[in-house]
Amino acid sequence: MFRAIISACTFSVLSLSLVLACDTGDAAEPAIPVVPISTAALPPEWAIWERHVLEQLHPALLTFVDKYTREDGTLIWRDEWPGFDGSDDGYESFYNFPLYYALGGPQSIDPLARKLWDGVTRQFTGYGQVYDEFDAHYDWMHHGESYTNFYMFGLMDPNDSTFRERAVRFAALYTGENPDAPNFDPAKWLIRSPITGSRGPHFVNTAEDWVTHRPILAHYPLPFDDIPHVNSSAAWNDDELFPHILDAINERMMRGDVPLNLTSTSLMLNAYLTTGDDKYKQWIEDYVQAWMDRVADNDGILPDNVGLSGKVGEHMDGKWWGGYYGWRWPHGLFNQLESTIIGASNAYVVSGDARYLGLPRSVIDLVAKEGKTVDGILHVPHRHGDDGWYDYRPINSKYLVHLWYLSRADEDWQRIERLAAPSAWDELSYSKGKGDSENPEQWLAFVRGRNDEYPVQVLQACFGETMKRLDDIAKDQTTPDQQDVHHWQNLNPVVLEGLVQLMLGGPNHIYHGGMLSTSVRYFDPAGRRSGLPPDVAALVDRLTPSGVRIWLVNLHASEPREVILQAGMFGEHNFTRVRKIDHYPYQFNTINGKTFRVSLVPGAVGQLEVGLDRFVNQPSYAFPEMDE
């Protein structure tokens, strides 16, 4: 773990070169390099908007919390809620509060975010969905939605003892270390059911389990075409026919592994970032490799069901399709893309080995091979059933963006050019639903040199959505008995996509359980915390396979500021060089470290071209040393 020690340093500019002289005394490791930005100028428009959004999200957040929560952090809602659905929606209502803090939101968000998480946990324990502070049983699409909130506590304060204890205890649910929750079979390297949690694998579902989900699933295709007495999705809402659907699901879907479970690798990565224990790293690599082996053994096709013996199609009459959240039901391609990208990216982060990206590539190439060109755009099948591939539509290109962002490989850029609809590059829009990642394609176009107006556009669009939601909150006169379990997440006014993209140089995380991978991260040495210091704005405006270009601005007219830059969200990258473009350009000495410090004079505006070696360090939540 990198720990830099700062001592008294003096700088002088000779001609066009920077001379760094440091008295490190007996320090075992070198001091963090310091780059001065000493040219003042009028702040660019994007910087003013960025600081405005950072500051105004806080009163918006408080308006939301004050209206919908009690003093103890629980939601103002009904006394009972049946089934196994819902706790994810409670956590989702505040899922990005910790990330807002980590970007530079006020200090008070840290205890508030923890209070809200604890409140939801107690509330849904009372409802029956949560046991021992973790969902009793649910699938990993919904676990992913829940625990993104929890993972981001590590970005606020990785040394919090409660967070650390929970990180280890939750991971033990899937390592085989908790005998009361035998979710994982270490001999077969499989998770034993699509529905798992703190009470172990859930092999048999009851009508009570699905009571709140039935009306939603009535809008999706049936899980199978051959369910006795059932020929329409309306059967989900028919008390006489629904048991036949439930019997088919229990008989065919509930025993064995599915690709959706790859999202559990984020739970393991969270534990690894917290503890540094190699057993979590090994688990991630081995589990992702197990799925890569299944693809290889299935003629290059990702199977969506694996029985308890490890055999593909064991409970599906030998078919590789038909599993829970698989190629047919309910979403098809969407789930296979998300889960494989999440699993592969987590394996890449812990290992530095890009070969794991072959898993999502195999999914993309599979459907591309089956694609059909319609009006000049390749439409790919999103589902597979007994009659083969069907449901042809353009691929959601945001997943292609995530893949290229991770790899920076030419082959993944070619996938974007081949598969992404041309409109994806230019049509900036914002109507925030679940998640906060509406414009990854437009962001990628910007960092590749297209549309220099994008920073202001996306910040305005995101803030406009915040204002819309505040208006909806003000007009909301519903009572708890009228509110469904999605009510609050649809009103959460904290919209972060623009801040994440522009400040950190990466797309926002995949909503259903992905970890946030970024080019850089910022720390405030004066506040000894994560995030940009007051008055400082940052913009990553170019991305290359070997580096980034960053603007840094100090909007304060009379006070200097300092900020620490870290290579990657988890220090997984390494800085190699910094070329400063201030009043005169010059080459800064090689850095070869995770961090460097930038000093900003009052009103400073400067640009840094920064080299990166990517995925070369052990990732960690640990903060850099911030002492002077």
Image: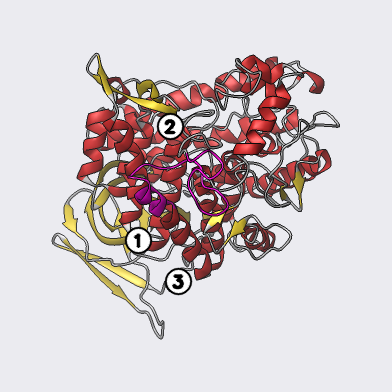
Kindly identify the amino acid type of the residue bearing the numbered disc 3. Met
Query: What residue did someone put label 3 on?
Result: 1
Compared with 498, 484 (above or below) is above
Query: Is 97 drawn above or below residue 182 in the view shown?
Result: above
- How packed mark 2 is, by other alpha carbons closer than 10 Å (few <14, some 14-19, many 20 or more), is many
Q: Nearer the viewer, mark 2 or mark 1?
A: 2
Q: Nearer the viewer, mark 2 or mark 3?
A: 2
* Location of residue 338 by image quarter: top left
Type of amino acid under label 1: Gly
Region in magenta: 291-318
> Looking at this view, is 275 or 254 the one in front?
254
Judge whether residue 408 can be spotted in this image: yes
Query: Where does the image place residue 523, in percent across and percent down from the top left?
Result: 47, 55
Residue at horizontal 66%, vertical 45%?
Answer: 113
Residue furthest left as drawn: 15
Earlier residue among tags 1 and 3: 3
Q: Which residue is mark 1?
A: 352
Please give the name of the residue rendered at 69% of the width and 30% of the height, measured from the top-left corner.
246
Which kind of residue does numbered mark 2 sit on?
Leu
Q: Are marks 2 and 1 in contact (CB under 8 Å)?
A: no
Q: Is residue 622 visible?
A: no
Measured along the vertical axis of the image, is residue 591 above or below residue 205? Answer: below
Label 2 vs 1, first from the N-terminus:
2
Report the side of 349 relative to 483 (left or right): left
Task: Give coordinates of residue 327: x percent, y percent.
Answer: 46, 33
**Quarter of the image that includes the N terminus:** bottom left
368 vs 563, nearest the viewer: 368
Image location of residue 527, percent across then percent down: 54, 56
Mark identifier at residue 333: 2
